[in-house]
Image (cartoon, rainbow, N blue to C red):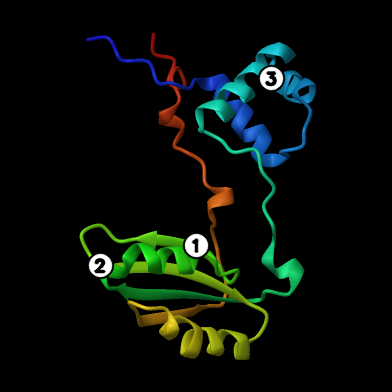
Amino acid sequence: MARTPAPFDELDYQILLALRENARQPAADIARLTGANERTVRNRIDRMAESGAIRLTSIVDPHAFGYVNTVDIFLEVDPEQEQAAIDNLLNRQEITYLALGQGTKEVSIEGRFKDIAEMREFLGRVLPAVPGVHVTGYALVPRIIRNIDSWLPKADDFAHLDNEN
């Protein structure tokens, strides 16, 4: 049975590896690394960006701005106030990540703070003041070992890596 081609191939994979190493790298340099035509590399980058497979953006290092305290916070949100609570949380500069649990009232957020006093204020006064929100737990995160900016799909997600025809 013929295998359905993946939307991305080995060249896409090589381009992603090069961009992950240096996102500002010119397409001409990536073309030399991959053996592909420069126009092809540009077109592939554009296609991946336009399809939403990659986002061409800068990633800010919170530590560079003094945000050295990270905390994962778990919330229970009243379903009737969920959208208002989410809107409120999305407007909070301290929150770097917000996710809803499926089939639950739980919300997971990550907060970044310059010091422990700022974090305690957020946990003890700011969050409890958001209507419909109840803090169920939190964990101070002393070190993030892997973040989304270092994630990459499995090589198997790219067609032709295993030389199948």
Closer to the camera in the image, 153 or 55: 55
**Alpha carbon separation for disc pair 1 and 2:** 20 Å
Q: Left or right: 62 with respect to 71?
A: right
Q: Nearer the viewer, mark 2 or mark 3?
A: 2
Residue 78, horizontal then vertical, whole percent: 27, 73
Residue indicated by mark 1: 97
Amino acid at the residue labelled 3: Arg
Amino acid at the residue labelled 1: Tyr
Closer to the camera in the image, 13 or 103: 103
- SS of the residue at dot 3? helix
Sequence-first tag of 1 and 2: 2
Residue 79, horizontal then vertical, whole percent: 25, 67
Neighbourhood count class around disc 1 (C-alpha, 10 Å): few under 14, some 14–19, many 20 upward: some
- SS of the residue at dot 1? strand
**Alpha carbon separation for disc pair 2 and 3:** 45 Å
Amino acid at the residue labelled 2: Pro
In contact (CB < 8 Å): disc 3 and disc 1: no
